[in-house]
Amino acid sequence: MFTDSKSNLSRLFQLRQELSLAINRIIGYSDMIIAEIAENQDVPYLQKLEQIRASGKELLISVNTALEPAILTGDWQILQEMVNNTQLKSQWEKTTQLVIAQSQQLIPQVDQNFMLEVEQINRAANLLLQEIQGLIEVVASEELLEDTVLDIDINLLLDNFSLTDHQLAEASKGHMILVVDDSAMNREILAEQVEAEGYQAATAQDGKQAIEMIQTGAFDLILLDIIMPEIDGYQVLKWIRNSPWKHIPTIMISALEQIDSVVKCIEMGAEDYLTKPFNSTLLKARLGACLEQKRLRDLESIYVKQLAQANQKISQFNNCLQVENTRLSSELEVNQKLQKMLLPKEKELQQIEALEIAGFSEAAAEIGGDYYDVVQHQGRIIIGIGDVSGHGLESGVLMLMVQTAIRTLIENNETDPKHLFEVLNRTIYKNVQRLNSDKNISLSLVDYYDGILSISGQHEEILLIRQGKIERIDTVDLGFPLGLAESIADFVFETKIPLAKSDVAILYTDGITEAENSQGIHYGLEQLCAVVQQNWQQSAQDIRQAVIQDLRSHIGIEQVYDDITLVVLKRK
């Protein structure tokens, strides 16, 4: 069904196109017959045709709904999870089998004039059933192209995770259709029917003129007659499929006795066919199905264009920073740089008057989602620290969302922690649902003002050192992980703790306490407390250095699998 050279996103588009094409044929042919017999309510098989059409529409909605999350994110994993949903697959199979059975029952019942259309419904339904039943094997056999998924996700990130309204409008703009037929009457009739459906139409009287017009790049679909003098439909179709305009869908025009020729054209790459005389209902269905495929391809082109623009921005950024690599070519490198850009700078921290603050954050071999930030606003100093569950690009993206949202809320004078966490959680929860993810975020906010630390949110224990003695502040009852529930307002609380001169507070993520040495032994909270207790009289920067040096000595040459984040606060 797919070729190895295509990206995951392309394959997702193609999968939806193939399923939708078969379904649209079921809908289109049943629509055509119903339109012919609708005025005669006594036709015994009208109800069965309406049931077939309804089943087709039900399938089309279900397929598009199921595949949309995967297409929006370019995530093959989402598709695999959808395929493993046996209830959904069973529903598709059951509905398709019903269409097959009903169309088989119709074959001996319908008028001879509609025999070909009913057979086409049956053939399309059987093809659809084969595709549904083979879906698991196809998805399981495909290797994930991680770099492709990464590029698309990063591109969406840099472009606010969505296409703009203008881009969507461009992909769905009014369509121009080229009608190619050596019969002036046929051209005129078909062009009028095309325009009656709301499309624009242009005409070509032979293959030579068609090729000249196609090279203008102005057409979204081509209606191409097979039998023409000099350059016939076969030759034009072959030229199209080997030209830069091969993405333009082509519908072949044929007489009933040319069905064998139509089959040949389909094998050559034609999207569909129409028989003479032209049926307006069938024409509408065929145009709609093919233009939907064209729309999806255009959307894919927009994604590719965005990707190229994002890569150019990243390259320019790297040149400015004189970084060795001129292109961010891996998931880890891209995410680490995006996160590092948003960390508080040393110079910024040194300008804070009331507190010494020293921070450290180092990304792991796998992408994690550690977060820390320092925000000054109207005399308050707010320090945030958190950790997204799991690893991978999603974790990194959610961390960036949290950083942006918290800064926005604080800059808009949000001082109530209960309301701040509630708004923040709603934002994260909706994005987690959109990503079809199970990620969540542990987060604590420490708000310093006039000698008081106000602590809210659930994260790791906070260490407070007063005159060499350590207090461990448990934050479990101060909040709830973000992204797990739609509302967490009832779970958010605040505790206030005085911070005297020379008192020290330590914030950290589990990447420190759970770091392992070669024997698999964790660094542990007790060791962290011991190092801090030995160095509490030093500056915040020296305490940080002592902890990180001791941690590195513990880890040795072992690979680090989780981000390491440490923030040291000391009142001046």
Image: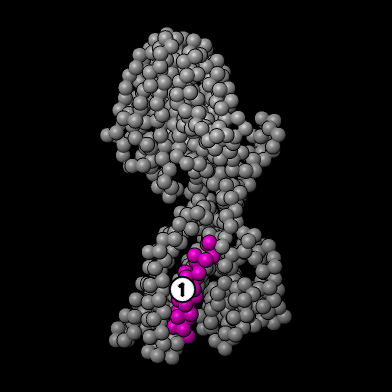
* Residue in view at x 48 percent, y 80 percent: 123
* Residue in view at x 51 percent, y 48 percent: 163
Q: Nearer the viewer, residue 248 or 85?
A: 85
* Range drawn in magenta: 116-140
* Residue in view at x 59 percent, y 50 percent: 146
| In the image, residue 101 lies in the stretch drawn in magenta | no
Q: Nearer the viewer, residue 539 or 49?
A: 539
Residue 175 coordinates in the image, percent (x, y): 54, 63
Instruction: Provide the residue designation for mark 1.
Output: 129
Residue 46 coordinates in the image, percent (x, y): 33, 82
Q: Is residue 544 visible?
A: yes
Q: Quadrant of residue 37?
A: bottom left
Crowding at dot 1, Cα within 10 Å, few <14 / some 14-19 / many 20+, comes out as many
Above or below, 482 relative to 237: above
| In the image, residue 130 lies in the stretch drawn in magenta | yes
Residue 304 coordinates in the image, percent (x, y): 60, 51
Q: Is residue 475 left or right of residue 344?
A: left
